[in-house]
Image (spheres, rainbow, N blue to C red):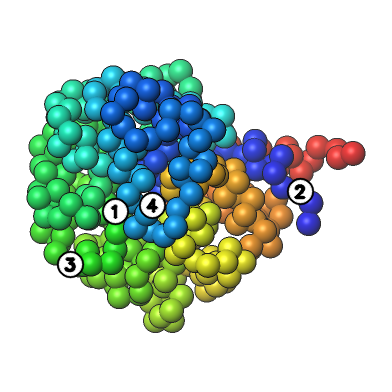
Amino acid sequence: MSDLRPFIAGLPKAELHVHHVGSASPRIVAELSARHPDSRVPTDPAALAEYFTFTDFAHFIEVYLSVVDLVRTPEDVRLLTFEVARDMARQNIRYAELTITPYSSVRRGIDEKAFMAAIEDARTAAEAELGVVLRWCFDIPGEAGLEAAEVTTRLAVDLRPEGLVSFGLGGPEIGVPRPQFKPYFDRAIAAGLRSVPHAGETTGPQTIWDALTELRAERIGHGTSAVQDPALVAHLAEHRIPLEVCPTSNLATRAVTDLELHPIRQLAEAGVLVTVNSDDPPMFGTDLNTEYAVAARLLGLDERGVAELAKNAVTASFLDETGKSRIAGEIDRYTADWLAAPRA
Protein backbone atom coordinates (compact mmCIF):
# COMPACT_ATOMS: atom_id res chain seq x y z
CA MET A 1 0.00 0.00 0.00
CA SER A 2 1.30 3.45 -0.88
CA ASP A 3 2.05 6.04 1.76
CA LEU A 4 -1.29 7.78 2.26
CA ARG A 5 -0.04 10.49 4.62
CA PRO A 6 0.45 13.18 1.94
CA PHE A 7 -3.04 12.47 0.59
CA ILE A 8 -4.55 12.59 4.08
CA ALA A 9 -2.78 15.83 4.94
CA GLY A 10 -4.54 17.71 2.15
CA LEU A 11 -7.87 15.91 2.42
CA PRO A 12 -10.80 18.12 3.58
CA LYS A 13 -12.13 16.62 6.78
CA ALA A 14 -14.76 16.90 9.50
CA GLU A 15 -14.26 15.86 13.13
CA LEU A 16 -17.03 14.87 15.50
CA HIS A 17 -15.33 13.69 18.70
CA VAL A 18 -12.72 16.12 19.95
CA HIS A 19 -12.59 17.79 23.35
CA HIS A 20 -12.12 21.50 23.92
CA VAL A 21 -9.56 21.49 26.75
CA GLY A 22 -8.13 18.17 25.58
CA SER A 23 -7.18 19.79 22.26
CA ALA A 24 -4.90 22.39 23.85
CA SER A 25 -1.48 22.13 22.23
CA PRO A 26 1.64 21.86 24.44
CA ARG A 27 2.41 25.49 23.61
CA ILE A 28 -0.99 26.66 24.83
CA VAL A 29 -0.98 24.40 27.89
CA ALA A 30 2.46 25.71 28.84
CA GLU A 31 1.30 29.30 28.34
CA LEU A 32 -1.78 28.76 30.49
CA SER A 33 0.31 27.02 33.15
CA ALA A 34 2.71 29.96 33.23
CA ARG A 35 -0.27 32.28 33.76
CA HIS A 36 -1.33 30.21 36.77
CA PRO A 37 1.86 29.24 38.65
CA ASP A 38 0.00 27.43 41.43
CA SER A 39 -0.73 24.62 38.94
CA ARG A 40 1.30 21.39 38.90
CA VAL A 41 1.12 21.21 35.09
CA PRO A 42 4.60 21.67 33.55
CA THR A 43 5.35 25.01 31.91
CA ASP A 44 7.92 23.40 29.60
CA PRO A 45 6.24 22.03 26.45
CA ALA A 46 8.88 19.29 26.23
CA ALA A 47 8.00 18.05 29.73
CA LEU A 48 4.33 17.72 28.79
CA ALA A 49 4.97 14.56 26.76
CA GLU A 50 5.96 12.73 29.93
CA TYR A 51 3.14 14.36 31.89
CA PHE A 52 0.69 13.12 29.25
CA THR A 53 1.73 9.47 29.63
CA PHE A 54 -1.19 7.67 31.24
CA THR A 55 -1.22 4.48 33.28
CA ASP A 56 -4.97 3.91 32.84
CA PHE A 57 -8.22 5.75 32.20
CA ALA A 58 -8.50 7.00 35.79
CA HIS A 59 -5.01 8.53 35.54
CA PHE A 60 -5.98 10.17 32.25
CA ILE A 61 -9.01 11.81 33.92
CA GLU A 62 -6.78 13.05 36.75
CA VAL A 63 -4.33 14.66 34.33
CA TYR A 64 -7.12 16.00 32.13
CA LEU A 65 -8.75 17.76 35.07
CA SER A 66 -5.43 19.35 36.02
CA VAL A 67 -5.36 20.96 32.57
CA VAL A 68 -9.02 21.99 32.89
CA ASP A 69 -7.97 23.87 36.02
CA LEU A 70 -5.72 26.09 33.89
CA VAL A 71 -8.71 27.65 32.13
CA ARG A 72 -9.80 30.24 34.68
CA THR A 73 -10.81 33.42 32.83
CA PRO A 74 -12.85 34.29 29.73
CA GLU A 75 -9.56 35.33 28.10
CA ASP A 76 -8.18 31.83 28.74
CA VAL A 77 -11.31 30.34 27.16
CA ARG A 78 -11.11 32.53 24.07
CA LEU A 79 -7.38 31.87 23.58
CA LEU A 80 -7.79 28.13 23.92
CA THR A 81 -10.77 27.93 21.57
CA PHE A 82 -9.27 29.97 18.76
CA GLU A 83 -5.91 28.17 18.97
CA VAL A 84 -7.67 24.80 18.74
CA ALA A 85 -9.31 26.04 15.53
CA ARG A 86 -5.92 27.18 14.23
CA ASP A 87 -4.52 23.68 14.73
CA MET A 88 -7.56 22.26 12.93
CA ALA A 89 -7.05 24.59 9.97
CA ARG A 90 -3.48 23.31 9.58
CA GLN A 91 -4.94 19.81 9.11
CA ASN A 92 -7.57 20.91 6.56
CA ILE A 93 -10.39 20.26 9.00
CA ARG A 94 -13.31 22.18 7.55
CA TYR A 95 -15.87 21.44 10.25
CA ALA A 96 -15.70 20.25 13.85
CA GLU A 97 -18.14 19.59 16.65
CA LEU A 98 -16.08 20.48 19.69
CA THR A 99 -17.08 18.91 22.99
CA ILE A 100 -17.12 21.56 25.72
CA THR A 101 -17.68 21.00 29.44
CA PRO A 102 -19.02 24.36 30.66
CA TYR A 103 -19.65 23.06 34.19
CA SER A 104 -15.91 22.71 34.74
CA SER A 105 -15.36 26.36 33.90
CA VAL A 106 -18.29 28.00 35.64
CA ARG A 107 -17.70 26.13 38.88
CA ARG A 108 -14.15 27.51 38.80
CA GLY A 109 -15.60 31.01 38.83
CA ILE A 110 -15.90 32.03 35.17
CA ASP A 111 -19.09 34.00 34.63
CA GLU A 112 -21.59 31.97 32.61
CA LYS A 113 -22.42 34.66 30.10
CA ALA A 114 -18.76 35.63 29.72
CA PHE A 115 -17.93 31.98 29.00
CA MET A 116 -20.56 31.81 26.27
CA ALA A 117 -19.36 35.09 24.78
CA ALA A 118 -15.76 33.84 24.74
CA ILE A 119 -16.47 30.62 22.85
CA GLU A 120 -18.79 32.39 20.42
CA ASP A 121 -16.26 35.13 19.72
CA ALA A 122 -13.65 32.47 18.99
CA ARG A 123 -16.11 30.53 16.80
CA THR A 124 -17.00 33.46 14.58
CA ALA A 125 -13.34 34.52 14.31
CA ALA A 126 -12.27 30.98 13.41
CA GLU A 127 -14.76 30.80 10.56
CA ALA A 128 -13.92 34.27 9.25
CA GLU A 129 -10.14 34.08 9.61
CA LEU A 130 -9.34 30.37 9.32
CA GLY A 131 -12.22 28.89 7.34
CA VAL A 132 -13.00 26.40 10.13
CA VAL A 133 -16.68 25.98 11.02
CA LEU A 134 -17.11 25.11 14.70
CA ARG A 135 -20.15 23.82 16.50
CA TRP A 136 -20.48 22.89 20.16
CA CYS A 137 -21.49 19.81 22.10
CA PHE A 138 -22.04 20.64 25.79
CA ASP A 139 -21.29 17.56 27.83
CA ILE A 140 -21.95 16.51 31.40
CA PRO A 141 -18.80 15.44 33.28
CA GLY A 142 -20.17 12.15 34.57
CA GLU A 143 -17.79 11.96 37.51
CA ALA A 144 -19.32 15.19 38.93
CA GLY A 145 -22.76 13.64 39.26
CA LEU A 146 -26.27 15.01 38.97
CA GLU A 147 -25.36 18.51 40.14
CA ALA A 148 -23.16 18.83 37.06
CA ALA A 149 -25.97 17.42 34.93
CA GLU A 150 -28.40 20.05 36.22
CA VAL A 151 -25.97 22.92 35.66
CA THR A 152 -24.97 21.70 32.20
CA THR A 153 -28.59 21.30 31.13
CA ARG A 154 -29.53 24.76 32.40
CA LEU A 155 -26.59 26.35 30.58
CA ALA A 156 -27.40 24.48 27.38
CA VAL A 157 -31.12 25.23 27.40
CA ASP A 158 -31.36 28.66 29.04
CA LEU A 159 -28.14 30.28 27.79
CA ARG A 160 -27.87 28.34 24.55
CA PRO A 161 -25.11 29.85 22.40
CA GLU A 162 -25.66 30.04 18.66
CA GLY A 163 -23.11 27.34 17.89
CA LEU A 164 -24.55 24.70 20.22
CA VAL A 165 -25.96 21.65 18.39
CA SER A 166 -25.69 18.68 20.74
CA PHE A 167 -25.64 17.37 24.29
CA GLY A 168 -23.26 14.75 25.63
CA LEU A 169 -21.96 12.81 28.60
CA GLY A 170 -18.26 12.25 29.19
CA GLY A 171 -15.83 11.24 31.92
CA PRO A 172 -15.52 7.79 33.47
CA GLU A 173 -18.09 5.17 32.57
CA ILE A 174 -17.33 2.75 35.40
CA GLY A 175 -19.57 3.60 38.33
CA VAL A 176 -21.45 6.23 36.31
CA PRO A 177 -24.55 4.50 34.90
CA ARG A 178 -26.14 6.20 31.92
CA PRO A 179 -29.84 5.88 32.91
CA GLN A 180 -29.56 8.39 35.80
CA PHE A 181 -28.99 11.15 33.23
CA LYS A 182 -32.20 10.48 31.31
CA PRO A 183 -34.17 13.50 32.65
CA TYR A 184 -31.40 15.87 31.61
CA PHE A 185 -31.12 14.43 28.12
CA ASP A 186 -34.91 14.57 27.80
CA ARG A 187 -34.80 18.31 28.54
CA ALA A 188 -31.96 18.93 26.13
CA ILE A 189 -33.62 16.94 23.35
CA ALA A 190 -36.90 18.79 23.93
CA ALA A 191 -34.95 22.03 23.41
CA GLY A 192 -33.75 20.77 20.02
CA LEU A 193 -30.29 19.45 20.90
CA ARG A 194 -28.98 16.15 19.57
CA SER A 195 -27.93 13.31 21.90
CA VAL A 196 -24.28 12.18 21.66
CA PRO A 197 -23.16 10.47 24.91
CA HIS A 198 -19.93 8.56 25.40
CA ALA A 199 -20.58 4.86 25.93
CA GLY A 200 -18.81 1.53 25.59
CA GLU A 201 -15.27 2.86 25.83
CA THR A 202 -14.21 1.31 29.15
CA THR A 203 -17.39 -0.64 29.89
CA GLY A 204 -19.33 -3.28 27.98
CA PRO A 205 -22.19 -3.24 25.47
CA GLN A 206 -24.89 -2.62 28.08
CA THR A 207 -23.63 0.94 28.50
CA ILE A 208 -24.23 1.48 24.78
CA TRP A 209 -27.71 -0.03 24.97
CA ASP A 210 -28.46 2.30 27.89
CA ALA A 211 -27.25 5.29 25.90
CA LEU A 212 -29.53 4.30 23.03
CA THR A 213 -32.64 3.42 25.01
CA GLU A 214 -32.42 5.84 27.95
CA LEU A 215 -30.54 8.81 26.47
CA ARG A 216 -31.87 8.42 22.91
CA ALA A 217 -28.37 8.66 21.47
CA GLU A 218 -28.10 9.58 17.79
CA ARG A 219 -24.36 8.94 17.77
CA ILE A 220 -22.16 7.09 20.24
CA GLY A 221 -18.86 8.43 21.53
CA HIS A 222 -16.36 5.56 21.19
CA GLY A 223 -18.69 2.53 21.35
CA THR A 224 -15.88 0.08 20.71
CA SER A 225 -17.20 -2.58 23.11
CA ALA A 226 -20.21 -3.03 20.80
CA VAL A 227 -18.29 -5.84 19.10
CA GLN A 228 -18.92 -7.99 22.17
CA ASP A 229 -22.65 -8.08 21.32
CA PRO A 230 -23.58 -9.15 17.77
CA ALA A 231 -27.18 -8.00 18.27
CA LEU A 232 -25.95 -4.51 19.18
CA VAL A 233 -23.65 -4.37 16.16
CA ALA A 234 -26.56 -5.38 13.93
CA HIS A 235 -28.75 -2.70 15.54
CA LEU A 236 -26.14 0.01 15.00
CA ALA A 237 -25.69 -1.02 11.37
CA GLU A 238 -29.39 -1.34 10.60
CA HIS A 239 -30.30 2.03 12.12
CA ARG A 240 -27.20 3.80 10.80
CA ILE A 241 -26.18 4.98 14.27
CA PRO A 242 -22.65 6.31 13.87
CA LEU A 243 -19.75 5.53 16.17
CA GLU A 244 -17.13 8.18 16.93
CA VAL A 245 -14.02 5.98 16.98
CA CYS A 246 -10.72 7.27 18.42
CA PRO A 247 -8.05 4.57 17.93
CA THR A 248 -4.96 6.17 19.52
CA SER A 249 -7.01 7.45 22.45
CA ASN A 250 -8.26 3.93 23.13
CA LEU A 251 -4.70 2.67 23.23
CA ALA A 252 -3.42 5.55 25.38
CA THR A 253 -6.13 5.07 28.01
CA ARG A 254 -5.73 1.27 27.89
CA ALA A 255 -9.26 0.81 26.62
CA VAL A 256 -7.59 -1.45 24.05
CA THR A 257 -4.32 -3.25 24.71
CA ASP A 258 -3.05 -3.50 21.15
CA LEU A 259 -3.82 -1.16 18.25
CA GLU A 260 -3.64 -4.08 15.83
CA LEU A 261 -6.58 -5.65 17.68
CA HIS A 262 -8.71 -2.50 17.64
CA PRO A 263 -12.35 -3.39 16.81
CA ILE A 264 -12.71 -0.71 14.12
CA ARG A 265 -12.19 -3.35 11.43
CA GLN A 266 -14.93 -5.62 12.78
CA LEU A 267 -17.32 -2.70 13.13
CA ALA A 268 -16.73 -1.43 9.59
CA GLU A 269 -17.00 -4.91 8.09
CA ALA A 270 -20.35 -5.34 9.87
CA GLY A 271 -21.69 -2.23 8.15
CA VAL A 272 -21.55 0.15 11.11
CA LEU A 273 -21.12 3.81 10.14
CA VAL A 274 -17.66 4.47 11.57
CA THR A 275 -16.12 7.92 11.88
CA VAL A 276 -12.50 8.62 12.84
CA ASN A 277 -11.60 11.17 15.48
CA SER A 278 -8.71 12.33 17.68
CA ASP A 279 -10.48 12.82 21.07
CA ASP A 280 -7.77 14.70 23.06
CA PRO A 281 -5.04 14.90 20.41
CA PRO A 282 -2.05 16.61 22.09
CA MET A 283 -2.57 14.56 25.25
CA PHE A 284 -2.37 11.38 23.19
CA GLY A 285 0.45 12.54 20.92
CA THR A 286 -1.74 12.45 17.83
CA ASP A 287 -3.90 14.55 15.50
CA LEU A 288 -6.71 13.81 13.08
CA ASN A 289 -4.36 13.24 10.15
CA THR A 290 -2.52 10.59 12.17
CA GLU A 291 -5.80 8.93 13.14
CA TYR A 292 -6.78 8.68 9.48
CA ALA A 293 -3.43 7.06 8.68
CA VAL A 294 -3.95 4.56 11.52
CA ALA A 295 -7.50 3.80 10.39
CA ALA A 296 -6.43 3.42 6.76
CA ARG A 297 -3.85 0.83 7.78
CA LEU A 298 -6.21 -1.07 10.07
CA LEU A 299 -8.97 -1.07 7.44
CA GLY A 300 -6.72 -1.66 4.42
CA LEU A 301 -7.90 1.45 2.60
CA ASP A 302 -6.58 3.22 -0.49
CA GLU A 303 -7.17 6.88 -1.33
CA ARG A 304 -10.77 6.31 -2.39
CA GLY A 305 -11.44 4.36 0.79
CA VAL A 306 -9.98 7.12 2.95
CA ALA A 307 -12.12 9.68 1.12
CA GLU A 308 -15.25 7.62 1.83
CA LEU A 309 -14.21 7.41 5.48
CA ALA A 310 -13.92 11.20 5.54
CA LYS A 311 -17.41 11.47 4.03
CA ASN A 312 -18.75 9.25 6.82
CA ALA A 313 -17.96 12.04 9.29
CA VAL A 314 -19.73 14.56 7.08
CA THR A 315 -22.78 12.30 6.85
CA ALA A 316 -22.84 11.72 10.61
CA SER A 317 -22.40 15.40 11.47
CA PHE A 318 -25.11 17.82 12.54
CA LEU A 319 -24.14 20.31 9.86
CA ASP A 320 -26.98 21.50 7.64
CA GLU A 321 -27.46 19.77 4.28
CA THR A 322 -25.93 22.65 2.32
CA GLY A 323 -22.81 22.50 4.45
CA LYS A 324 -22.63 18.72 4.15
CA SER A 325 -22.87 18.91 0.36
CA ARG A 326 -20.16 21.55 0.25
CA ILE A 327 -17.61 19.52 2.23
CA ALA A 328 -18.50 16.24 0.50
CA GLY A 329 -17.98 17.99 -2.82
CA GLU A 330 -14.59 19.27 -1.67
CA ILE A 331 -13.59 15.74 -0.71
CA ASP A 332 -14.65 14.35 -4.09
CA ARG A 333 -12.87 17.08 -6.07
CA TYR A 334 -9.70 16.78 -4.02
CA THR A 335 -9.65 12.99 -4.44
CA ALA A 336 -10.29 13.14 -8.19
CA ASP A 337 -7.53 15.73 -8.67
CA TRP A 338 -5.11 13.71 -6.55
CA LEU A 339 -5.72 10.48 -8.46
CA ALA A 340 -5.48 12.25 -11.82
CA ALA A 341 -2.15 13.91 -11.02
CA PRO A 342 1.01 12.19 -12.27
CA ARG A 343 3.18 10.50 -9.65
CA ALA A 344 6.94 10.13 -9.77
Q: Which element is circle 2 on?
A: loop
Instruction: Tell me which numbered mark, 3 or 4, is placed earlier along the sequence.
Output: 4
The reply to whether the C-beta atoms of the residues labelled 2 and 4 are less than 8 Å apart is no
Q: Report the residue that reaches farthest toward the right.
A: 344
Q: Residue at x 46, y 62 (%)?
A: 254
The reply to whether the C-beta atoms of the residues labelled 4 and 1 are less than 8 Å apart is no
What residue did someone put label 1 on? 170
* Amino acid type indicated by mark 1: Gly
The label number, if any, that marks residue 179 in the structure image: 3
Measure how far apart labels 3 and 1 are at the Cα level: 14 Å
Q: Which element is circle 1 on?
A: strand
Crowding at mark 1 (Cα within 10 Å: few <14, some 14-19, many 20+): many
Asked if 212 appears above or below 245 in the picture, the reply is below
Q: Which element is circle 4 on?
A: helix
The label number, if any, that marks residue 44 in the structure image: none
> Where does residue 224 sit, x and y in percent of width and height?
44, 67
Q: Is residue 16 left or right of residue 114?
A: right
Q: Residue at x 51, y 59 (%)?
A: 251
**Which dot, 1 or 2, sits closer to the camera?**
1
The reply to whether the C-beta atoms of the residues labelled 3 and 1 are less than 8 Å apart is no
